[in-house]
Amino acid sequence: MTVKNGDFIRIDYTEFVDGQAIATTDKDLAEEKGIFSEEIQYGPHLVVMGAGQLVKGFESDLVGKEIGYSGRVEMDPENAFGLHDPKNIELVPLNRFKEERPVPGMRVGMDNRTGTVTRVIGRKVSIDFNHPLAGKTVVYEYTIRETVEDQTERLKALIKTFGRVDLEAEIKDEIAVITVPWELNYYKEWVMIRRGLADMIIQHLGMKEVHYIEKHTGEKVRAELISPPGKESGSEGPQDMESKTAEENPASGDATV
């Protein structure tokens, strides 16, 4: 079987920039290279071909390959994360930062965009809104592990990958039914996640509807013990390739201003 648009496949990969490994699905290699993160779930990563998870050069290289294939692809910036655009560097007032003083390398969210603080000049902060790997040549070494054919397995894989949480799920008469613990309501971003997840399920599984069923067990749960879906830092570590192999290894944390 060869990979084509619309397929659900699982791949292992290692991402390189300037000869250095910056992201991988291999836990042992991550530890060896000093890029291990407790927030990343290592192992083969689910890719829905055509869903825009991968940079175009990587996805194009997968098309037509056999399951089990191992290879390497090198991409120029145009086929990876784009060219570095000076117009995407902006100066903002220091007083926009209310809770944490900005420092170079800090990843910040501002006006629905994410950028990197490059300089603090007096009362002004320079923020680069280009992708951290813009202008870089990127190399992927990868293996296509398997294809996912069963619809219920595909549904659960989508939930795990895009919702970043394991949930009970089944398909009934072309309706995806997902059971959600009530505790997820404590996670403020769950509302947006569940909407985006439903869109993915309808688009890529051909479901007519997505039903979320809130589950209550009567068990007392303290809010501070609730563990929301994991927040992946960039490089798109293995679990964040849905945002184009995400924001590579933020240097010193994220802040929203």
Image: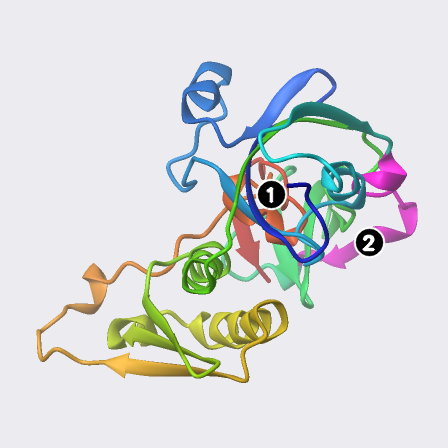
Horizontal placement of 76 versus 220: left or right? right
> Above or below — where is 64 with respect to 19?
below
Horizontal placement of 175 versus 168: left or right? right
Q: Residue at x 60, y 47 (%)?
A: 241
> Above or below — where is 212 with respect to 103?
below
Its colouring scheme is rainbow
> Above or below — where is 101 with respect to 84?
below
Identify the amino acid type marked 2. Answer: Glu
Q: Position of residue 177 (x, y in %)?
A: 38, 78
Q: Position of residue 169 (x, y in %)?
A: 35, 69
Judge by depth and name the residue closer to the eye, 82 or 47: 47
Instruction: Give, as a single range, the part of the protein colored magenta.
Output: 77-94
Horizontal placement of 245 versus 127: left or right? left
Q: Position of residue 189 (x, y in %)?
A: 46, 70
Q: Residues within 10 Å of mark 1 (few under 14, many from 20)?
A: some
Judge by depth and name the residue closer to the eye, 200 or 111: 200
Q: Position of residue 234 (x, y in %)?
A: 58, 43
Q: Residue at x 72, y 38 (%)?
A: 62
Identify the amino acid type marked 1. Answer: Met
Q: Which mark is residue 157?
A: none
Q: Residue at x 52, y 70 (%)?
A: 197
Which quarter shows the C terminus?
Answer: bottom right
Which residue position holds label 1? 106
Residue 221 visible somewhere in the drawing: yes
Q: Is 68 colored magenta in this rendering? A: no
Which residue position holds label 2? 90
Separation of residues labelled 1 and 2 (CA atoms): 15 Å
Horizontal placement of 68 versus 231: left or right? right
Q: Tell me the element at label 2.
A: strand
Q: Tell me the element at label 1.
A: loop
Which quarter shows the N terminus?
Answer: top right
Q: Is 84 colored magenta in this rendering? A: yes
